[in-house]
Amino acid sequence: MATQTQDEVLSASHIPSHVAIIMDGNGRWAKQRGLPRTEGHIRGQDALRTTLRAAARRGIKYLTVYTFSTENWSRPQEEVDALMSILVSAIHAETPQLIAEGVRMRAIGDLSRLPQQAQDSLAESIELTKDGQQITLILALSYSSRDEIRRASQRLAAEAAAGRLRPEEITEEIISSYLDTAEYPDPDLVIRTGGEERISNYLLWQSAYSELYFSETYWPDFGQEALDEALAAYASRERRFGKTSEQIQLED
C-alpha cells in the first residue's frame, strides 16, 4: 500500500475548526542567538503571520493566540513597554493585509488594562476587519483563564443578587455565555510551542475536551511545517468526549 503524503493525510482527515496556540519560546530563541528578548518577540510576529496564513489554507476557521497574559504584567517594565509598542506597530502594519486576506480580528481578556493607544489601535482593527470570512484571529491579550472565570463569576453573582438569575438556573451553558469566548466554539486543538508541557492558565474552561500538542519548536521558528505536524497528530487521535471507542464507532 502506498504511503500517504502529509497533504493527503490532512486533506482526508478532519481539520480542527478552532486551534489555540500558546506562543512560547521567543526569549529563549533570542538568547540562543545572543539577541535581546525583544528581537524574539519581533520575530514571533513574523511567525504569527506565517502560521495564520497556513491555518487559513488548511481550512481552520478560528485561531486563538496567547499574546499577552495577565501574569506578563509582572515582567520588567522595559519588556512590557516594548511588547505594547510591538503590539501597536503590528496592528497598524498588519491590518491592511488582514482585510485583503479576509481575516477577522477579535480579542479576549481584560483589555481595559492595555495602554490607551493599544486599546484604540485594537478597536480600530477589529472594526476594519469585521467582515472577514476566511478565518477569525483571536488575540488573547491581558488574559488568563482564572481571571476570565473570576470576571464571569462576578457578573453572574451580580445577576443573581439583582434577582435576574436563580442559582439553580446556572448551567455550564450559562457560565460559557459569560466568558470572553462566548461567541466562539471551544478549541479542538491546543498547541504549545517551545518545548514546555503545560497550559499556563490558558482557556482552562474551554479546553476541557481539547486535544493537546506540545512542539519543541520555538515560536519564532514555527510555521507551515510545524503546524502541519500538529494537525497530523490531531488527525491520528480519536476524540471521545468521555465516551468509549465503541460508542464513537457506532455514531460514525
Image (tube, grey):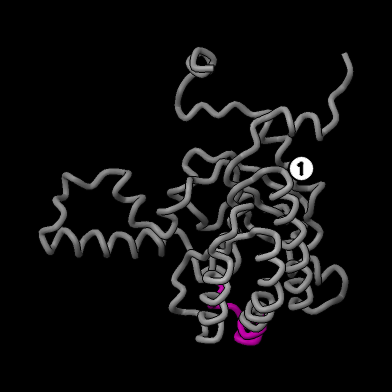
Under mark 1, the amino acid is Asp
Residue 71 seen in the figure? no
Q: Position of residue 186 (x, y in %)?
A: 49, 45
Residue 41 in magenta stretch: no
Indicate the quadrant containing the C terminus: top left, top right, bottom left or bottom right: top right
Q: Position of residue 223 (x, y in %)?
A: 79, 54
Q: Which residue is mark 1?
A: 228
**Splitting the image into 4 quarters, where does residue 178 fall?**
bottom left
User: With respect to residue 43, does 176 lie above or below?
Assistant: above
Q: Position of residue 160 (x, y in %)?
A: 16, 58
User: With respect to residue 184, does 123 lie above or below?
Assistant: below
Number of other residues with Cα within 10 Å of mark 1, as a class: few under 14, some 14 to 19, many 20 or more = some
Check disc 1 and report its element: helix, strand or loop.
helix
**Splitting the image into 4 quarters, where does residue 200 fall?**
bottom right
Residue 59 seen in the figure? yes
Q: Position of residue 29 (x, y in %)?
A: 80, 66
User: From the viewer's perspective, is 154 left or right of 131?
Assistant: left
| SS assignment for the magenta stretch, majority | helix
Q: Looking at the image, which is closer to me, 119 or 248?
A: 119
Q: What residue is shown at x 40% (from left), y 62% (from top)? A: 148
Extent of the magenta region: 71-82
Q: How many marks?
A: 1
User: From the viewer's perspective, is 192 left or right of 74?
Assistant: right
User: From the viewer's perspective, is 163 left or right of 66?
Assistant: left
Indicate the quadrant containing the N terminus: top left, top right, bottom left or bottom right: top right
Residue 76 in magenta stretch: yes
Q: What residue is shown at x 70% (from left), y 49% (from top)? A: 55
Q: What residue is shown at x 69% (from left), y 72% (from top)? A: 96
Q: What residue is shown at x 41% (from left), y 64% (from top)? A: 147
